[in-house]
Image (cartoon, grey):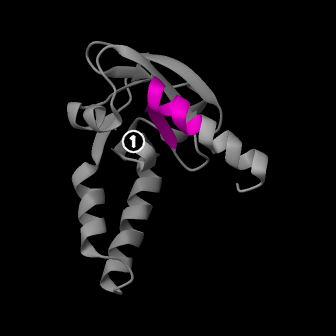
Amino acid sequence: MFFGLHERQLDDKGRVALPAAYRSDLGDRCYLIIGDSRCIDVYSAEEFESRAQEMIASVKRGEAPLSRQRALAHSATVVGVDKQGRITIDEKLREFARIPLPSKVIVTGNLDRVEVWSESVYAEIADRSTAEMARGDA
């Protein structure tokens, strides 16, 4: 499980060091995909591949549209985790998440995945999430 919030620096090559607490669960390779609310979702290979199989089965049963499967497949990038615990986020995903090079990013746990956020987008999301929890909507 992934939880917590960590401030990190994305370098001029698009690399960010993952928190040490996340590295063992992610392994030496992981998948990056477009996430909700303009973040980048980071999944362990095992979790992503399981979700992909579930998506394929849902499409075959007519429970999910093929366009959703395409969106998942087209946005996915497999990346290695280097010896310093860094992953490289490609330009396509950085543009989606509004993360310029170099910049501060927020890396958060969301239980079954890790999320990478631009600092400004995360600030907006955090305010809304806190308000929802305070109202009991969460």
Quarter placement of the C terminus: bottom right
Give the magenta-colored segment's residue range. 114-126
Q: Position of residue 38 (x, y in %)?
A: 39, 42
Viewer can see residue 117: yes
Q: Where is residue 96 in the image (x, y as percent from the top left)?
A: 29, 39
Q: Mark 1 points at which residue?
A: 38
Above or below residue 119? Residue 133 is below
In the foreground, 95 or 48: 95
Q: Which residue is drawn at 41% across and 71% down?
A: 54
Q: Which residue is drawn at 37% across and 70% down?
A: 55
Q: Give left or right: position of 26 versus 77.
A: right
Crowding near the residue tagged with mark 1, few <14, some 14–19, many ≥20 C-alpha atoms within 10 Å: many
Quarter where residue 39 is shown: top left
Q: Is residue 123 magenta?
A: yes
Q: Residue at x 77, y 54 (%)?
A: 136
Q: Callout 1: helix, strand or loop?
A: helix
